[in-house]
């Protein structure tokens, strides 16, 4: 646990100076303005919740992809990856700690989106279920970290992570229904969305911004958390297997 918390603090110190974090934090308000403008032009201000939820989830997933890729690439470029792997501390715990630090950005992105709606459009979205909303953002952040940690193993094997990062962003936005509900997707594609934690997060977060009581909030949070745990477990297993392989063939520091 001490190693995990140290990794979290280390990543937080790096994150607020990282161009990727700055880019995500600047993009979230701009996306909010775009989505709210579309809602107002269409005369559907009742969909303002969608415009707040979408930038939050998009920011979380995008920054997790950046962190998962740059974590390995930067260590490799600095020549410290071999030392990190050879250290007594488990690399998997370090990776998980640094990935979980992204959760803080999810809370910040939600606050940005909510404030942008109020300051720019005068649309101060009420928070009738703040406990559910905050819990959903936090659990989603952890699930995002767990899912993205699977990619860290892949990035150990690949010279560049940017191609994978760019490829996996928009398909996850679509399958996760972050802006357009999963119910609007073709029927044959909807089952694939059930395995994507973002689809559960988007539906629950949107429901938490509506006045009616949130139905089955705890079971839905449990599903999001469960998918995150599966992601963490898969990431740890894959990372262990990949490290054994690169040690055997001597390609750990290959660029």
Image: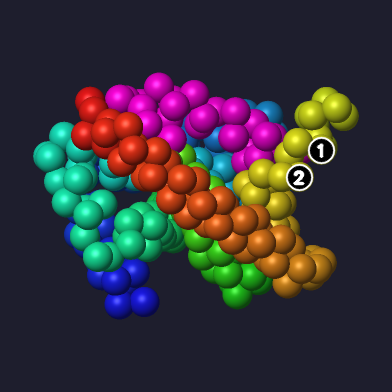
Q: Is residue 75 visible?
A: yes
Which residue position holds label 2? Answer: 194
The label on residue 253 is none
Q: Position of residue 228 (x, y in %)?
A: 59, 57
Residue at the extreme left of the image, as rendered: 78
Image quadrant for the N terminus?
A: bottom left
Queried whether the magenta region covers residue 229, the answer comes back as no
Identify which residue is drawn at 50% across, 31% down.
169
Q: Which mark is residue 191?
A: 1
Q: Which residues are magenta?
A: 154-182
Q: Sort mark 2 into few (<14), some (14-19) or many (20+) by Cα contacts within 10 Å.
A: some
Q: SS of the residue at dot 2?
A: helix
Q: Nearer the viewer, residue 153 or 124?
A: 153
Identified at 65% across, 49% down, the residue is 197
Depth order, front residue of 2/100: 2
Q: How is the image coloured?
A: rainbow
Q: Residue at x 48, y 54 (%)?
A: 236
Is 8 in front, or is 54?
8
Q: Circle 1 sits in a helix, a strand or a loop, which is it?
A: helix
Residue 133's quadrant in the figure?
A: bottom right
| Extreme residue in the bottom direction | 2
Predominant secondary structure in magenta? helix
Location of residue 131 (image quadrant): bottom right
Q: Report the side of 4 relative to 170 (left or right).
A: left
Q: Position of residue 209 (x, y in %)?
A: 66, 60
Q: How many marks?
A: 2
Q: Is residue 155 left or right of residue 61?
A: left
**Disc 2 + disc 1, Cβ < 8 Å:** yes
Expressed as whole percent of the image width and height from the top left, the position of residue 212 reads 79, 66
Screen quadrant of the C terminus: top left
């Amino acid at each position: 646990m001490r190693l995990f918390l140290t990794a979290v603090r280390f990543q937080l110190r790096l994150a607020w100076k990282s161009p990727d974090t700055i880019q995500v934090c600047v993009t979230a308000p701009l996306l909010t303005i775009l989505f709210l403008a579309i809602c107002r032009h269409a005369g559907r201000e009742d969909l303002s919740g969608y415009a707040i939820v979408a930038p939050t989830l998009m920011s979380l997933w995008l920054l997790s992809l950046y962190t998962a890729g740059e974590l390995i690439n930067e260590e490799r470029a600095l020549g410290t990856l071999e030392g990190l792997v050879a250290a007594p501390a488990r690399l998997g715990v370090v990776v998980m700690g640094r990935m979980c630090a992204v959760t803080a950005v999810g809370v910040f992105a939600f606050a940005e989106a909510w404030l942008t709606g109020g300051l720019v459009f005068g649309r101060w979205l009420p928070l009738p279920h703040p406990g559910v909303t905050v819990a959903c953002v936090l659990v989603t952040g952890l699930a995002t970290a767990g899912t993205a940690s699977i990619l860290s193993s892949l990035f150990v094997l690949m010279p560049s992570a940017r191609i994978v990062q760019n490829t996996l962003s928009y398909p996850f936005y679509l399958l996760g229904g972050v802006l357009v509900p999963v119910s609007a997707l073709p029927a044959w594609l909807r089952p694939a969305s059930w395995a994507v934690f973002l689809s559960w997060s988007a539906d629950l977060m949107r429901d938490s911004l509506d006045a009616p009581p949130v139905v089955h909030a705890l079971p839905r949070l449990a599903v999001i958390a469960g998918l995150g745990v599966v992601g963490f477990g898969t990431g740890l297993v894959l990372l262990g297997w990949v490290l054994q392989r690169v040690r055997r063939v001597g390609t750990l520091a290959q660029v």
